[in-house]
Amino acid sequence: MGQMHRVSWRLVCGVFLCFCLSAVSLQAQTLQRGESRGVADSVDSESLSDQSWAQFRGPGARGVSAGAQVPEVWSATENVAWKRDLPGRGWSSPVVWGRHVFLTTVVNTGKSEEPKKGLYFGGDRTAPPQSVHQWKVLCLDLVTGEVQWEHQVHEGPPQSSIHIKSSFASETAVTDGERVYFCFGNLGIYCFDFAGQQLWRHELGAVPMRFGWGTAASPVLHAGRLYYCCDNDQQSYLLALDAVTGKQLWRTDREDKSNWSTPFIWQHDQRTEIVTAGTGGTVSYDLEGKVLWSIRGGMSSITIATPYAADGLLYVSSGYVLDPNRPIYAIRPGASGDITPEKGVTSSEYIAWLQPTAAPYNPSTLVSGERLFVLYDRGFVAGVHARTGAPLFEQQRLPNGRAFTASPWAAAGRIFCLNEDGVTFVLQDSDKYELVRKNVLAEDDMGMASPAIAGDRLLIRTSARLYCFRNGGATAGSESGSDQ
C-alpha cells in the first residue's frame, strides 16, 4: 500500500463501512424434501436463470433478471404479495430455489445499538458486545411467506466486533437446489437440506478485521465444491470444501488483508477460474487454488464490490470514497501471470478497458445489455458502454437519494436502485438518464441488502421485514400465515 494510504488510515479510522450485502420463475416441480439427487453442477450457470436466485446477486452474480413480469411499482401496501417481520438484524440477501426462500439473522438478546444511515466517521466498534446473541437460519415459503423452518445454530456473546451499520449476518447464503449453505464469517458455514436438517458445519472462528468492522464476503458454489474467501488482518485465505460432506479439500493463503468482496466463479470457453478482488489487487485462481493471473495494486484501500462477467468480459471494481484509486476493470479471458497495467495505461492484451477513478464504494456495478451502470453511495448514477468504457451519460444525482449500499438490479427494461431509506429509484434501461418513478416503503424500513427475484416476484429485505412484491399483490393461498 502506498504512503498516502498508510497515512490515510489514521484519518479514516471509524469511517462508515457497510456491506454489500448486498430467481426468476417457480420450478415446475418442487424439490422433494430429503431426496438425495447429488449436487447441481454450478449455481451460476445460465440454465438456472429461469428457476432460481441461488446466490448473492443471482445468476452469474450479475443482478439481472430475465423475467418480464417483475414488478416496477410497489410500496409498503401496493403490489405486496406478503410481508414478514424478521427477528434480529441481518443484511444478508434472500436466496430462492423453487418455493424455498433462505436467509440469516442474528438476534441480540440485550440492548442493540441502532444503525445510522449514510457515510460518516465514528461507526467502528473495536470491542465485541457482551450480550448474548443468537445466530439463526430461516426458510420461508415463497408463495405464502410462512416460515417453513427456523434453527438457531449458535448462542453466546460474539467473539468479534462489527461496524455500527453492519450485522453479524451480512453473508448471503448459497444453494445448489438440494442443500443450502449458510455462512457467518465470524462463526462458521452450516449446510442444511431443504427439510431443515443440518448436514454438516465447518468452523471458521473469529478473525481480526480492519477497524473491527466484521465480515461480509459470501460463499459460492461450483461443481460440487463450496468456495469461501476470508480476507482478514491475521491470515487471509481462500478455502474449498466438499459441498456434500463439508470436508476441506484445500486452503490457499493470501497476501491481502481485510476485504469484503465475494469471489466469483468465472466460466468461459478456455477454463473455469475463481476471481477474487482485494485491496492488494485482483487475483484469479484455478479450481485447485493455484494462481492463474493477477493485477497487483491499483485498487482502492477498501474493496467490497463483487466481480462478475457479462458478454465475455470480467468486471472488477473497487471504490473507497476517500481514495484516489477507484478503478473499474473490464478483463478479457485467457490471461496468465502478472497483467498489471503500467501507470497511465488503460488497455492491454487482457485489459479491455480501465477507468481508474469511476468505481462506487459499496454497490457492485451492473451490466444490462450493452450498458454498464454505476450507482454511487452518495446518490449519483452514471452509464458507460460495457465493452469500451466510453461514457453514455455523466453522473446524475438521484433526487433526495442520499445514501446507497445495496447493489442495483435490472429487470423488464428498468434499472432499480434501492437507497438506505427504503426508496427505490426506477430508471429507464437506456443510453440516457431517465428517472421513471420512485417506490417508497415504510418509515422503519432501512434498505441495505441487495434483493432477490423469483419469477414474477421481487424480494426486498429491510431492517424490519422481508417483502415479497408481485403485480396484483396477493393471490389465492398467499395470505395464509403472512403479515399482509
Image: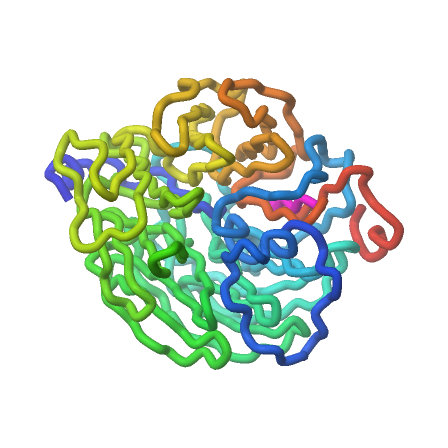
State the predominant SS element of the stretch in magenta.
strand
Q: Nearer the viewer, residue 128 or 106?
A: 106
Residue 442 x %, y %: 68, 34
Up-down relation of residue 326 to residue 83 (above or below): above
Res 424 quadrant in image: top right
Report the label total. 0
Q: Indicate whether 11 appears above or below 225.
A: above
Instruction: Tell me if residue 466 can be seen.
Output: yes
Residue 295 falls left or right of residue 155: left
Q: Describe the colour scheme in one phrase.
A: rainbow
Q: Is residue 461 magenta?
A: yes
Q: Residue at x 67, y 79 (%)?
A: 35
Up-down: is 119 above or below 165?
above
Asked whether residue 112 is in view, the answer is no
Q: Nearer the viewer, residue 76 or 117?
A: 76
Image side of residue 249 versus residue 164, left or right: left
Residue at the extreme front? 269
| Residue 459, image x, y percentages | 65, 46
Q: Magenta segment, which residues?
A: 457-463
Q: Position of residue 301 (x, y in %)?
A: 25, 41
If the image is split into quadrants, where does the N terminus sit?
Answer: top left
Q: Quadrant of residue 64?
A: top right
Identify the residue at horizontal 48%, vertical 51% (top origin): 60
Residue at 73% x, 47% y: name it.
83
Please give the name of the residue rendered at 53% of the width and 45% of the height, measured from the top-left corner: 449
Q: Is residue 353 magenta?
A: no
Residue that protrudes farthest toward the left in the picture:
3
